[in-house]
Image: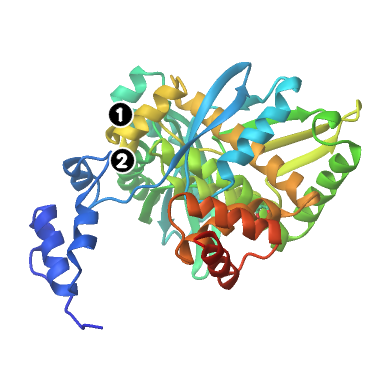
Amino acid sequence: MHSYSSRIEGFHKQAPDDRLRLVAERTHLDAGSAAHFADTGNLPLETANRMIENVIGTMSIPVGVATNMIVDGRDLFVPMATEESSVVAAVCNAAKQARSGGGFVTSTTGSLMIAQIQLLDVSDPETARIKILERRDDIKAICDAKDPVLLKFGGGFHDLEVRIVDGARGPMVITHIIVDTRDAMGANAVNTMAEALAPSIAEWTGGRTLLRILSNLADRRLARARCTWKAEDIGGTAVRDGMVEAFQFADADPYRATTHNKGIMNGVTAVVLATGNDTRAVESGAHAYAARSGRYRSLSRWEVTKDGDLSGVLEMPLAVGLIGGATKVHPTAQACLKIMEIDSADRLARIVVSVGLAQNFAALRVLATTGVQKGHMSLHAQNIAIMAGAAGEEIDAVAKKLVARGTVRIDIAEEELKTLRG
Ligand code: MEV
């Protein structure tokens, strides 16, 4: 191991290839690894360099297409960017079994985002709260003046809420501006408005404003999907009942709910990432929403219909946009939107929530029946075969032997490879 200094004067001003060279020199990186970073695939280096700081390259993640999805009566392919095996296949299977029931039906609350302004040092928080609420018209004017383009597209200031939140050092008056951000995710729009508004809030109340930032708990921007799977399409009533019991476990126990919701996010995040949207914004919003009752619970709900079929519903905050950020500049994100024929952020949110529900269905089904390891076995066996030295067609051949023997182990893979090679 070499020890090196990570201090480089003016590193951020260098060109990406110079940065890469400097890092490679300091870390004694081999030429192959350095060349690897230089290959930026479907994201041009100049674009990457404008997206974040100190760029030295890019990293590719597979994009798979989920087939069989019907969302609000429209068939579509859904591109999903994920590093996890089984995620795309799971959606394909779940969506296929949902087709005879018509697929996914969705709704949304519209594209309302919240920004918060923190007000401190007010001796009379109740009065301050009312004083802010009195200024609704002024607040609307200040906010809307900041984004005439949003206004033109039917968005802008929508509503006002003022809460008193008890902090460790006394009450804080928290103003929420609720803004319709239309096809934008909206972080930029609402942050600009909150920053513009804060001085007026301080002036009207005599207090001191501090933070001015959007809330990722986008509970005014919910997307909902529901879907009915016919009992006969999913393996019968025992499977159906097992899935409902699996949901009940998740809803009652945060340890299970975390994994259950992680499965939902396998699908949600993959579409959010494929479209260049902010995965962390959606994830933090989802988990906070799951805990809104004071206990962390399942984001989805599952029950049996009067006809004996399985019905699943998923409702969650989904702050995704089409304009701005990586969505606009990443050519792959643009291509993914084209595949889905997306014409509004609202439609994208509907597709994403449907994929989340499909993913959850697939996980519950496999967990309540065979368990996840059976499906993972063949991919795992392929990896072990590669580790044992198999190449080309040998990989599949050795993996099949491992699965047939029911033991996926490197020593057995080596043994099988030896036999195969005669
Ligand atoms: C694995 O990535 C996701 C699951 O664990 C989800 C679940 O347990 O519901 C299979």
Residue under the point 41% across and 19% down:
154
Residue 400 lies, in percent from the top left, at 62, 53
Q: Is residue 1 left or right of residue 256?
A: left
Image quarter of the N terminus: bottom left
Residue 340 lies, in percent from the top left, at 47, 23
User: Splitting the image into 4 quarters, where does residue 138 fall?
Assistant: top left
Tag 1: amino acid: Asp
Per the image, the residue denoted by label 2 is 192
Confirm or deny contact between disc 1 and disc 2 (CB under 8 A).
Answer: yes
Q: Is residue 30 left or right of residue 404?
A: left
Above or below: residue 137 compared with residue 51: above
In terms of secondary structure, where does tag 2 sit? helix
Residue under the point 85% across and 42% down:
239
User: Splitting the image into 4 quarters, where does residue 409 fall?
Assistant: bottom right
Question: 94 or 325: nearer the eye?
Answer: 94
Q: Is residue 242 left or right of residue 205?
A: right
Q: CA distance from mark 1 to mark 2?
A: 9 Å
Residue 96 lies, in percent from the top left, at 68, 28
Per the image, the residue denoted by label 1 is 147
Residue under the point 45% across and 22% down:
342
Tag 2: amino acid: Thr
Above or below: residue 57 compared with residue 329: below
Circle 2 packing at 10 Å, graded few (<14), some (14-19), many (20+), is some
